[in-house]
Image (spheres, coloured by chain):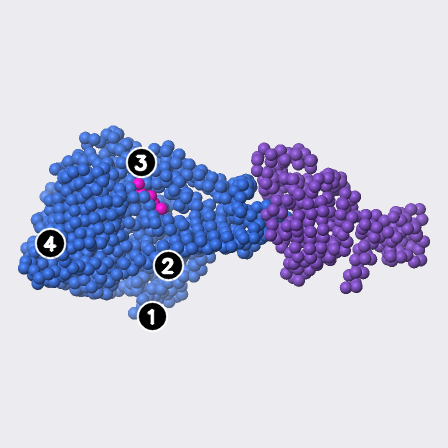
Chain colours: A purple, B blue
Amino acid sequence: MNIQIQDLSQVYKNDFRALNKVNLDIESGMFGLLGPNGAGKSTLMRILVTLLKPTHGEVFVNGMPLSKNRAEVRSYLGYLPQDFRFFSKLRTWEFLDYAASLAGIKKKKERLAAVDELLEQVGLFDVRNRYANKLSGGMKRRLGIAQALIGDPKIIIVDEPTTGLDPEERIRFRNILSNLSQKEVIIILSTHIVGDISSTCRQMALLNRGEVHFQGSPEAFVKQSSGHVFKTSVSFEQMKLISEQYPVITSVPGAGGYEIEFVADEVNGWETTLIEPNLEHAYVYFMEYVANEKFQYQ
Amino acid sequence: MMSLFNIKTVARFESKTLFRSWFFRIFALIILGFIIMFNLFGLTGIADGGWPGRLLPSGAPYFNMWLLNIAQAVIAVFLSADFLGRDKKLDTTEAFYVRSMSNSDYVLGKTIGVLKVFLLLNFLVMLSSFLFTLIANEVSIPLSSYFIYPLLVALPTLIFILGLSFFTMTLIRNQAVTFVLLLGFLALSLFYLRNKYYGLFDVLGFYTPFMRSDFTGFPNLSITFAQRAMYLCMGVVLIMSTVWRLPRLEQQRFNKPFLLSGIFVFLVISTGSAWQVINNSYQANKLLSHVQTLNKGLKKAHYQIDEYHLQLNHKGETIACKAQLDLSLANSTDTEVILALNPGLKVTTCHLNGQKLDYKQEAHLITIQLPPLSDDTIRLALEYSGTTTDDAVYADISEEVKAADNRKDPLLAGKQYSFVQSDYVLLTRESNWYPVVADKQYWTSYPFTNMELEVSTKPMLTVVSQGMCDSLSNGQYRFRSEQPLNAYSVIIGDFEKYTTTIDSIEFSLYHHKKHTFYKEYFTELNDTISHVIKNVKGDFERKLGLSYPYKRFSVVEVPVNMHSYLRNWTLATENIMPEMVLFPENGGGVWQNDLANIKNRVKRRTEFSNEERSDKEMQIEVLKSYLGDNFISPSRFFFGRRQEGERHVENWGRYQVFPMYFTYNNRISESEYPLLTIALENYLHQRLSTSRRRDLGGLSSNDEVILKLRENSLRELINKEDVNTLGNVFASKGHQLFSNLKVNVGQSNFDKQLDKLLESTRFENQSVSDFTTDINHITKVDFKPIYDNWLNAAYNPAFLFSSVDVNEVKDGNRVRYFLKVTVTNKGDADGIIAFTVREGMQGGGRGRFRGRFQMDAEQDNEQSYLVEAGKSYEIGFLLDEEPRDVSVNTFLAENIPSNQTLIIREVNRNNKRIDFFEGARETTKGLNFQLSNEIIVDNEDDGFSLVNTGESRTVKDWWASMQNEEEDSGTYGMVRFWNPPVKWEPVAGDKFFGEYLKSGVYKRKGSGEGYVSWNAKIPQPGSYAVYAYVPNIGFRFGRRRGGNDNREADYKFTVSHDDGQDEVTITVGSNNDGWQYLGEYYFSAGNAQVLLSDDTSNEFVIGDAVKWVRK
């Protein structure tokens, strides 16, 4: 499976350019799409799931142009929209049954088996007869992921799946996804939460203001910020000063002040220790220095 | 590509959600509950009194569907707008939008899902209708009706409404606005557009007749079908447009062209259907106006048909006729003959003595060119075939009357006038199925002509026509009438027939084989039925004074969609033909033909009066009631209403047999309107009528005629007005003509001789001069000037009556009662008055339904007097018992109401030696409306004025005023005590005060802001006693629950006099009506005024008259 995005642009009616000449190659495995709110992630997702026709450019799925093969592409898709909360008056299992039918499982027996299996998998089997709109927020999300996964989709697209979930739910959710990524499928996960792009993502892209600023492995992304992440101890008074100068990522209060980590192109006037960056460091560094500069140059 | 699986899936879950929505559940339960309750009580008739429409063929499923369809259209609007509304919560829907299905799968699935739920509802409703009909076990309804009605009525409406709501929703994307628009559209179609514009806007099928006859099925099926198809296809177009407008990317690239071409195809079918409806109407109107134009140009014909020899071959949906017409011409130099024939029948050949003749068929007229002739009698051979069309039948009836609904409360039947179907044929004279001479106004009076008719049809069908029937061979019959008739009809159908001979007349009943519900009501009557019929017939003929002229009498059941109109020139409709009554299926679904209902009534009455009656006696009673209400003395039921624009005749019914005793036997050949025939017919018909008391006022049709004739002679009216509106004028004037004649020779003498004359001239085309001679002979006066005067003069008599003096007198050894009334004719013409005096106490137990058919019970004895213009008479009566009631009929005088009850004074028992007499005596002591010392201001006078203020201050008032407007006829009404008007409205009746027009005004009680005032000019100063006239109206009916009989009403008068104003409150009980004393006041010369406020304790106030009497 692969998805090629070529020169994709989306301009809304109010002249807002949500995507600008986006080019991406996505291979099987989990693909993380990272970006701040309003970066164009959802727009890109909606184009990928055929809900939106791009103003310009084309998406190829396994080499097929999306705009001409919607029927086939749709049959590969599983989609969890961003704000998946409203349900009609259907029971949990019926909701999945509906999704399974539309996903093309025509035999009732197979369908019910698939429904039960997924219900088990997302831990909703006990509430299978409850009306979907009576489920708790976390359960609804899980039901959402279940309906996206039913019918063995080849391309799974989840848009901001972890917003509003408690940590336990979030972990369970990540596990479901990472289990799936073992198969020959593409999972595209869009998020503005760096923690979601866990080590399970084989590839990732960073989207900002409608443009792709980075594409590659998470490791490569982290590497970009190598040499720009620092650690130091500051007093309570100094804390204010330094946080005005540099983006502070973590601050741990200690005896006489804070232990802090921050990113910077270079540090002047502070005694610091260089540390190995992680994904979060890299994201902040990128957003603060690379992306903005690039934007400023334009 | 569309995927059936996807559609089914979407549909499955859509209907599941819909079914679970509370809105739907509650609505559906309410509707189902209502319909089941109705079916339970209406169809099975438990708890007394079922719905009479259950007896209509397919009445039960039709009514159920009729109700359901409105309800479900409304639910559909809410639900379907809701369906796309749900889609606005985009994210959940989007999870499904990304699935591999086409947009059409989705929308179609949704539509089918909604439809499935509604079809279930329809199924349940039809099932309940079916089960309850089965339980009631009265009528059988063809099983197919339970499927056809939902398909024909519900399905197109649903698809259209769904499509429309979906599509509006995709356009507007606002649920509330969509609701308002769609409900508005439904309301517009239901309350305003109704069946206007060819019924094109009747989405709900609410105004389209869907009455399914067991004989002939639906009326105008192809047009109804086209109308429904139009909505169905338009619905499909809208649904497809929804697919097109769906906010989801299409699945396949080439879907749109497919979709658009689909939309186009259905749009074409839909508009095609609409065009078919419009064009059908257009063509019909074109033909109709062509016929009307041709009719206007018709001239007096000088030839006539003497005899018909007709062979009618019924085959499939057509008839083919071979006609031989024996014509006599005025002279042998005539060059053409013009005949009228139904325009649906096409003439194929025309021969004279084997020689082919040239002819031209234009609309309904056939003009045949005659070769030079040697003889003035010829035999024309004509062949014609086709299917009769209803479009040009009743060309004289106004469009408004024709367009009015044929309501079988509350359902709608069609208006069909003739039928030629493969298993059923019904042709009456009006359909022109045989050629007649196209004389000037030929449709108003047909000559008597002999006919020999041969009919061939399918062997299993029964043929009914006039005359003696010989069966020639299988499916071939010959009818030969004993007399020449002026109307022939032929009916072919699959009938069950019963025949019995009574008084050497063959009585037959032809009914549909499945319409046997009546049998259980007459199980005991086998040997008595002829006795009952004989009695009823005897009573009727004694009252009418004429005998039955035919050898046969048949009641033939005809399709419920057959309709006939009452014309101005006759009381006969096409439902009565010589020898036969064409009776609607199962009695036409009216209250008085609901046998279960009649039976209950009879039973209740029996129980009420503590009588013991056997089943047989009860059944006789039921039969008498049934026969009486339909054939003998029909009267409109309390709830019966006047049909739009149609002529209204009291004591008349469509199936009344009266025309068989006159209209189809006697004819005076008149040019133009057959006024003499009309006059005679109405005079005779009046013999059957029982005058209805109008305690609450209101105008009889005769009173309305008086208003019309106030300044016009009959001739002037005919020239001036559309004759369509003159039916009642003809009737009243006609009655008056012969009532005038009988004064000279005495009523019974005149009637006896007239009856003899009529019976001896039956089936003759009598000339006017012959008739005049005969009448001269009977009345011993010259009829011609009387007739001319009657036609041309616009003078009216105007009568004043005194109250009735009653004296106990000694006549020999007997104590008797002497009544004296003084009457003065103040008008400019002589006039006739007829007194009816009823004596003794009223017979017990006379309910609303009793006594109408027992002709022998009480004969009203009417006595007529001639009152010459300007003269006064005393009229005396001598009675054996105390008088109960004296009423006088003034016919066409200035007096309104024309039938009034006079006030009877207290019996004077002290002066037994008074000089008594019987009959009329001229006197010089005339009556005057007012005395010289009186000033009277009546509500008709200039000094009277009224003020309406604060008309609608509450919603109730506003509603009442809306209701009033609907009922407002613009003329004098009756007192509607149950719903008085919020404005002063004129009323008339004999309880009111007035010189000749007894009238008043009345109004719902108010705050005192509304009032009426009487203003008089006081000629000379002095002391005056002031009186106000308060008529005694409505106390008998106006009782509320818990109220007492002696209900009293306050009347607040304000008298303005020299010393200021005095408010006088008068309390009027049920016993003191008439002039109420308001007090004595001093007035100087000039204006004086009395006001009456609308503030009262009663429900309404009546303002009538005030008088000032000088002391």
Q: How crowded is mark 1: few (under 14 residues within 10 Å), some or many (20 or more)?
A: few
Q: Position of residue B365 (x, y in %)?
A: 20, 58
- Nearer-N-terminus badge (3/1): 3
Residue B624 falls in which quadrant of the image?
top left
- Nearer-N-terminus badge (4/1): 4
How far, Cα to Cα, is label 4 from label 3?
Answer: 61 Å
Residue that mark 3 sits on: B596
The reply to whether callout 3 and callout 1 are in contact (CB within 8 Å) is: no
Q: Which residue is drawn at 25% across and 39% down?
A: B494
User: Element type at marker 1?
Assistant: strand
Residue B1076 makes an appearance in the image: no
Q: Which of marks 1 and 2 is in front?
A: 2
* Chain on which label 2 sits: B
Q: Nearer the viewer, residue A146 or B874?
A: A146
Residue that mark 2 sits on: B984
Q: Which mark is residue B354?
A: 4
* Chain on which label 4 sits: B
Q: Which residue is drawn at 22% across and 40% down?
A: B458
Q: Nearer the viewer, residue B172 or A265?
A: A265
